[in-house]
Image (cartoon, rainbow, N blue to C red):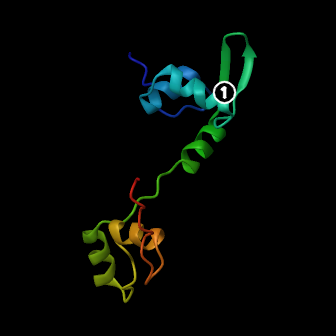
């Protein structure tokens, strides 16, 4: 019977190989997370590293991406509520780059 590497087990620790297969990433990427301290781990020997499942779950939750809403998502939200001030992606970027009534500084022509 083939073992499913993505299935959750009762083991509280996982290997680097497990993390690689779980995310579908290279060993270099996972090891860079370990080296930078982004992903806490335990070095049990010169070639044996284990990651606590709780640390992996926290790592995943911390890296959960927040995205800007699309115009259609804004319309869906607005139709179900009275909220009308949710910016779309491009509006949000414009709002962050300049305050209302301000213009971007003009570039000086090169001499």
Please name whichever residue, 111 or 87, is drawn nearer the observer in this view of the structure. 111
Q: Is residue 6 visible?
A: no
Please name whichever residue, 2 or 107, is drawn nearer the observer in this view of the structure. 107
Determine which residue is flagged by label 1: 35
Vertical relation: 31 (above or below) 85 = above
Q: Residue at x 59, y 27 (%)?
A: 32
Please name whichever residue, 2 or 14, is drawn nearer the observer in this view of the structure. 14
Q: Residue at x 38, y 17 (%)?
A: 2
Vertical relation: 105 (above or below) 46 = below
Per the image, label 1 sits on a secondary structure element best described as helix
Residue 39's spot in the image, x, y percent? Answer: 64, 35
Residue 7's spot in the image, x, y percent? Answer: 46, 32
Vertical relation: 91 (above or below) 41 = below
Residue 77's spot in the image, x, y percent? Answer: 33, 77
| Picture quarter with the N terminus | top left
Please name whichever residue, 62 or 67, is drawn nearer the observer in this view of the structure. 67
Residue 111's spot in the image, x, y percent? Answer: 41, 53
């Amino acid at each position: 019977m083939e073992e499913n590497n993505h299935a959750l087990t009762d083991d509280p620790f996982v290997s680097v190989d497990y993390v690689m297969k779980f995310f579908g990433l290279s060993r270099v990427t996972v090891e860079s997370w370990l080296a930078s301290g982004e992903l806490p781990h335990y070095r049990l020997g010169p070639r044996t590293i284990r990651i606590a499942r709780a640390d992996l779950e926290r790592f995943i939750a911390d890296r959960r991406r927040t995205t800007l809403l699309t115009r259609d998502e804004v319309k869906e939200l607005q139709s179900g509520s009275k909220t009308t001030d949710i910016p779309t992606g491009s509006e949000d970027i414009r709002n962050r780059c300049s305050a209302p009534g301000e213009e971007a500084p003009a570039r000086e022509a090169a001499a």
